[in-house]
Image (cartoon, coloured by chain):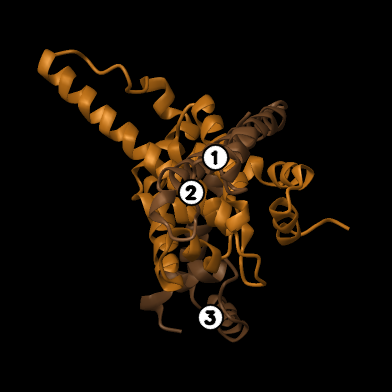
Chain colours: A orange, B brown
Amino acid sequence: MEKTDTDLMQAIRNGSRQAFETLVRRYQNPVFGFIRKYMDGERQQAEDLTQEVFLRVYLAAPRFEVRPDSSVSAWIFTIAYNLSMNEARRRRRQRDFRKELCEEHSFSGSESPSPEDSFHLRNAVFSALKELPEKQRAALLLRVTEGLSYTEISQVLHISVPGVESLIYRARKTLREKFPQKE
Amino acid sequence: MKCRKRGKTVSVYIDGELDAEKAGEMEKHLLQCAECRQARNDLRCADSLLAGLPPEEMGEDFVRNLMKKAAELRQKRSRSSSLVHFFEDFFDLLFAFKKKNTGTLDEFGDFPPCSLSRAYFNLF
């Protein structure tokens, strides 16, 4: 029988490397997918952040309280969300700084995507996601691509369940409005 | 079902997060209300855009590298905890004369068991 997340956390707390490896294998793709879509970043950067998430899980495992109501997935995604948010903010600060520098020296920006790419649906969806407010984007991805429940998302984002409902609805609506031709 | 609130409720319905009673009401309502059906299709469309993104998968060696790093980190931390022990013991020793009933430190043999020697051997 497959061990539950809670069983694995208990084993990790007792020092089991195998349990940690099982947990990593279970969550590596969902966490990586979430970070990649949330950040719209390079693959390598998303991989580094995913690694950081699991190292933090490993180090913090002894402090994780194993209770019937504690959700391991919500906890892992909380770490992923916090790390991604910090990294996104750091990148934005850097970008703003570079932009100021370029404007000051009349350089042209090198980061804007080529026109061909903009027409590609995948890039267009990524761009649309990127334009969503941070929490809307995170809530939508956690729900639609990672399948977390509203309660789990409320734990990850530290907001109420009605707050999650509103975020997801607004995110869906905005995303839909950006692709009126898509049926 | 009030249609002016339809959007958000439809969104919650799509996610299967409405309780059984409200979900039943919504299903009946959807049969009658074309506007809400359209809203449901629109919101589902947003989901299908995300579902159309390529799946993200980690490379084969991710777990191997991660386990290696975790082991290194653990080793590093256990070493640093020895250092913490060392400094705790060191400062205990340094200020031992201020504590009552600690005894004199005229002879090295008087060191309390949790002191410099233990910290030394833990560290190296």
- Asked if disc 1 and disc 2 are in contact, CB closer than 8 Å, the reply is yes
Residue shown at 26% from the left, 33% from the top: A93
Residue shown at 50% from the left, 34% from the top: A122
Mark number for residue B104?
2
Mark number for residue B29?
3
At label 3, which amino acid type do we have?
His
Q: Position of residue B56 (x, y in %)?
A: 61, 35
Subunit under mark 3? B
Residue B102 lies, with reference to residue B7, above or below; the image says: above
Query: Which residue is situated farthest in the left direction here?
Result: A104
The residue pinned by badge 1 equals B107
3D distance between C-alphas at marks 3 and 2: 86 Å
Q: Position of residue B77 (x, y in %)?
A: 58, 38
Residue shown at 48% from the left, 34% from the top: A121
3D distance between C-alphas at marks 1 and 2: 8 Å
Subunit under mark 2? B
Of the two numbered discs 3 and 2 on the same chain, state the one appearing first in sequence: 3
Query: Within 10 Å of the Cα at label 1, are there few (<14), some (14-19), or many (20+) other Cα atoms?
Result: few
Residue A81 lies, with reference to residue A110, above or below; the image says: below
At label 1, which amino acid type do we have?
Glu
- Callout 2: SS: loop
Query: Within 10 Å of the Cα at label 3, are there few (<14), some (14-19), or many (20+) other Cα atoms?
Result: some
Query: Within 10 Å of the Cα at label 2, are there few (<14), some (14-19), or many (20+) other Cα atoms?
Result: few
- Callout 3: SS: helix
The answer to whether tags 1 and 2 share a subunit is yes
Please identify the quadrant where the C terminus of chain B is shown.
top right
Q: Does any portion of residue A120 appear in the rendered image? A: yes
